[in-house]
Amino acid sequence: MMNKLRRKTSMTFSLFLATIVCGIASCVLISLIIVKYTHRHAYDNSHNRISSYVSALSSAVEFSGYSVAPNDFTRQELDVLADTYNGRVILADSQLGIVYDSFRTRFGTDDNRRYLVISHVPSALSGKSYFDVDESNCTATIIKPVAMRSKEGAAGVFYMTYPIGEELGHYNTLRRLVILVCLCVLIVTLAYAIFRAYFFTQPLREIKDQLAAINSGNRDNRLSVYQNRQVAGITDAVNELLEQTQETDEKRRNFISDVSHELKTPMTSMKVLSDALLQSGQEFSPDVREFLTDINSEIDRENHIISDLLALARLDRRTDVVRFERTHINDLLDVILKRIRPLAESHEVEVVYESYRDVYADVDEAKLLTAITNIVENAILYNRPQGNVFVTLNANMTYFFVTVQDTGYGIPEPHISHIFERFYRVDKDRSRATGGTGLGLAITKEIISAHGGQIKAFSKENEGTTFSIRIPLARQQKGGGNQ
């Protein structure tokens, strides 16, 4: 399962995804750190200023049980503090009795005194400070002990609550700014991820395209991708492998050619001798004559195989020159169909030919005749009785197309990718019965490749097979131009 997933996953997508994930993770982490730090210190300025004031207040106010209200100077300072922060300031004595409230400038006698009974206030008498922010109500609360000069502990409590709308607004503005910056960074990261993924995999795409061109028949070509050291190493390794493969193929082609030539002479001699015996006029027993006839047929079949091998060897070694001439393809197909008509009639197969326009192209007439004949003959031989073969010819501004479709037995899907291999036969018993050697389609593909064309097969078992041939109208040059 994992291997299938890896095969289907594009390297471009993997690099893109990895870059995006790293970018998003970095942006989220940095933004969280900035926002958290800003949130922690958003209210430090006002908190520190008020804490400094309380320290100064401890030195300026004489706390002796707060029997009297703070003096005018202290009261004035507390009023200024409350006005500055637009908040409420309360000063309480050691009994938590309120001696100053910015909302109430003076209280009555002890019987009418008010007390500061609020959470965390009693803790301030033991020296503990308290600071809290209520962002839902946009308020901050400070509770601090007011120390005596000569005694340990707190002689009073300073309590203040004030609005933090301005600080909260600055914090929210900064948070929105951080989010906006993160979005911009993510957009830049996305663009960089696309560029990086495309740029990084570009050499691999070039290697793939060049290998596809080599695989399509340009066996003399070599890779030429050297973007960086690693890619250059891959290119050199593949080129070295191609060189070794070409050398091996050359040895194989030489061997096939030499063996075929060596076999050709004795097979010809055997054919002459068997024909001489059959035509000598001597009286042979029926069994002997049948054996001689079978020997003659087998010699013909072997000669056909040897001829096909020699043809393939010449095509492989480029010693069989392709002679391009301006040819009327419609007439070429007419000749082919006339030649195979007796074969079609003997197999009770009807051949239907349809041409959409007159087509002229630069081709080797003899070789192309052989290639298309192989396809049409196969469509007849592997068809059903009372079946049909449809041959069509069409063209555009660059190519002409020949399609051969039959209503035969079809080719099982596992075999389709191998049918152009040499000596490959889908149904070996049927191929022997029809005289097939497994070389016809290989020769056809080599001829069409020599014309700069392509051939493809489409088939469905028990429904028939379609061969599609595409060949340039003008002769293809190695430089990529036309002649």
Image (cartoon, grey):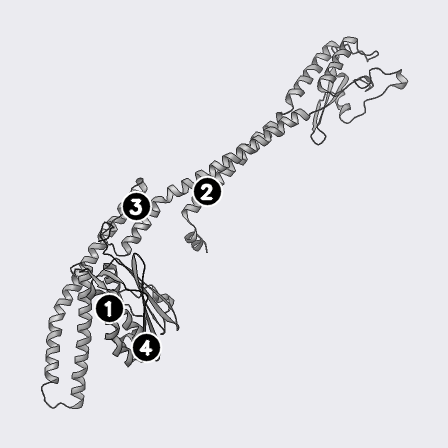
* Label number found at residue 18: 2
Image coordinates for residue 330, horizontal then vertical, percent: 26, 67
Q: Name the residue under label 4.
A: 350
The residue closer to the viewer here, 21 or 54, is 21
Mark closer to the observer (1, 4): 1
- Identity of the amino acid at label 3? Ile
Q: How far apart are marks 3 and 2 (CA)?
A: 24 Å
Q: Please report whichever mark, 1 or 4, sits nearer to the chain's N-terminal start.
A: 1
| Left or right: 79 as drawn, with respect to 186 | right
- Which of discs 2 and 4 lies nearer the camera? The answer is 4
**Marks 1 and 3, how far apart at CA:** 49 Å
Q: Single out the residue that lies furthest toward the right.
A: 111
Asked whether 123 or 359 is in front, the reply is: 359
Q: Nearer the viewer, mark 1 or mark 3?
A: 1
Q: Which secondary structure, mark 2?
A: helix
Estimate the x, y position of residue 270 in percent, counting from the top left. Answer: 12, 77
Question: Residue drawn 28% across and 74% down?
Answer: 431
Q: In this view, does 372 lie to the left or right of 91?
A: left
